[in-house]
Structure formats: structure tokens, C-alpha cells
Amino acid sequence: MLAARILAAAREAFATTGYAGTTMRAIARAADVDPALVYHYFGSKEALLDAATDPPQRWLDGVAATWATPVDRLGEALIRLMLGAWADDEIGPVLRAILQTAAHETTTREKLRRVVEGSLLGVSQLGTDDADRLRRSGLISSQLMGLAMVRYVWRIEPVASMTDDALVAAVAPTLQRYIEHDLG
Amino acid sequence: MLAARILAAAREAFATTGYAGTTMRAIARAADVDPALVYHYFGSKEALLDAATDPPQRWLDGVAATWATPVDRLGEALIRLMLGAWADDEIGPVLRAILQTAAHETTTREKLRRVVEGSLLGVSQLGTDDADRLRRSGLISSQLMGLAMVRYVWRIEPVASMTDDALVAAVAPTLQRYIEHDLG
């Protein structure tokens, strides 16, 4: 699949050199196709970024399934969901491309907001009202995305090399507290 | 001070458009100086990035002072230190420039590692041995930097607009747990 090959090359390039530092020509070269073909499939660099950072349906389904977890085990389920997604050959590169371009690209930042909202905010189990639910979701996101940045993007040790189980033991109680405890 | 004006313009430009997306010419224009002067002061774009992301001594001193806090109030002290630093006219733009370029620039990522180590790892109060201390420091960093990304870089609501006191109440216990509790 040529389009899939171009998308994979685009994710890698955007994640490594950023949106502004990436040219359509470099993506074409990495995908081993003619630049005209990249334009033919995706129209523009902006449209290619948009396509390259679209969350796979399988990830959205996994997120929805996670919310069926009983609330007292939701903290662990969320951290395991995050670790599994980053280890996934299809989903991991999309998440990486999103986090690595969201700092500078408004369109990716909007997508990150939607991913956060779609992953966390539709959670009727959380909190006492909408404002409380949103606050809890934001705090969960701050821990999960901070962990993703340290572990996968910035690769700061020892967090980059800790086992999944060690991270779950350390971080699940944080998430559980944001889910159901009094936050002052 | 011309050099200070160039540095401020460089931080803003790197944070907004990334390192690859920023030219020395654009920085010169933002600082309202001749591009030759930017080269005269800083030599190269890489050297300018390096200077623009150097942590101010006042910040390093503040970090050192925070570690004198009794261990049972260290969680709150650390989150207040982070919130104060981002609100500071001098320190905030440096932290922003570091976090917004570390995803793509190896030199900034190394600096981020050193800042994390310098801010957190020299903490003889934490943990039972070096490995345990490093693990606790990494987890503290993951929460503090995730919060900084969500609140200041990606500006995702409601975390972006929560009061300092509400964030301290919500996040200090997380840090306190990473500082002194059993992490499994």
C-alpha cells in the first residue's frame, strides 16, 4: 500500500524533525516514491500531517472498551492502555507524531485536545458534575502524557527503561486518586 | 541590552515555530536588530539555541532552596516551585523554550535531562538507594512536566485555567507519594 507507506514515512519524519523541519520531498524519499505521488495522495503537507496524526479506529475502540472497567481498577486499566498503545506498531507512531508536533502546530494541538477529550472526558463514572469530571480528566491526562513524554519522546532514564509492571505499580494509584478521591 | 533582547526573541521564536522552523533572520527581525548582529553575538543558530535555553542561575538557586523543605511538605514545595517558575518573566520563557524544542533537538533534550537531574536527582532525602532515588525523581518529573505541557504548552482546559491553589491541592499528594511512599 503506497498511501500507508507514505503515512508511515510522514509520521517518522514529523516526529523526528518536526512539521516545519520536514519537507514533502524528504517524506517521498523516505517512502521511496516520487514526490508527485505524495501530492497526488495527500494534496498538501498540512493535509498529510492531518492524515498522519489521525487516531486509528482500533485505538478508539480500545479506549472505549477500557471505560467498561470497574471504577476501582480504572487507574491500572488506563496506564496499561497507554503503555500498550505506545508499544503497538500501528498506534504508537501516531501517538508519537501527535505529541511531537502538537507543541508547534495548531491543527495537531486541536487533535490532541480531541484525543484527550475522546479518551477521557466521555467518562460518566468520573466526578460529581461536568466541571469536576473535566478537572479529573485533565489531571489524568497530565500524568499519562507526562509519562509518555519522559518515557518515549525525551527518553529520560530510568523511566524510559522501567518495566511496564513497575510503571503500573507506581502510577496506577496516582490515576486512581484522580479518578475517585477528594482532590481538595 | 541587545544580547538579552535577541535571547528573548529567540526563545519566543523557538517556542512558537520550533528550532527547524526558525531562521536567524526571523529572530533578528523580532528583536529589531540586524541579522549580522545576531551572528556577531551568538555565532550560529545552534549556539543561540544553547544560550536561549540555559537555565537562569536564579532558577537553579530556587531549586536548591526548595530541597531544604522538610520531606513531608516537599510535594507541595515542588509543585509551587514549578508554578512559580512558569509564571516568572525571566524563567518561564526559558522553560517553555526547552520543553518546546526538546522533542526534536538533541542538544535541548540533553539539557532537559540535565535540568531534570539538577532539579530532582540530587536529592539525598529521596529513596533508599541511588536506583530508588532515580526512579522516584523520574516519576516526579513525569507528573510535573506533563502538567507543564498540558497547562502551558498545549493549553488544554480546564488545567490551563485552574488556579495555582487548586493544582497544588490536586497534585501535591501525587508528588508526596512519589517522594516517600512505597511504589510497589
Image (cartoon, coloured by chain):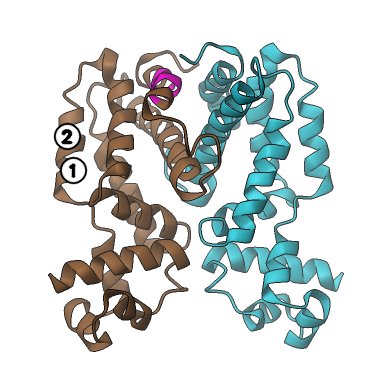
Chain colours: A brown, B cyan
Q: Secondary structure at mark 2?
A: helix
Q: Position of residue A21 (x, y in %)?
A: 47, 73
Q: How many residues crowd around disc 1 within 10 Å: few (fewer than 14), some, or many (20 or more)?
A: some
Residue furthest to the right in view is: B1
Q: Are marks 2 and 1 in contact (CB under 8 Å)?
A: yes
Q: Tell me what residue is drawn at x 15 percent, y 31 percent.
A: A65
- On what subunit does the disc labeled 1 rest? A
A84 left or right of B14? left
**To which residue does mark 1 refer?**
A60
Identify the amino acid type marked 2.
Answer: Ala
**Marks 2/1: CA–CA distance:** 6 Å
The chain identifier of the residue carrying mark 2 reads A
Query: Would you say B160 lies left or right of B60 here?
Result: left
Dot label at residue B167: none
- Tell me the kind of residue under disc 1: Leu
**Residue A133 pos. (x, y %):** 33, 27
Secondary structure mainly formed by the magenta segment:
helix
Q: Report how many numbered discs are placed on residues in the image.
A: 2
Q: Secondary structure at mark 1?
A: helix
Q: Give the crowd class for mark 2: few <14, some 14-19, many >=20 residues within 10 Å.
A: some
Which residues, given as a range, are shown in magenta?
A168-175
Q: Which residue is mark 2?
A: A64
Q: Is residue B57 above or below residue A80?
A: below
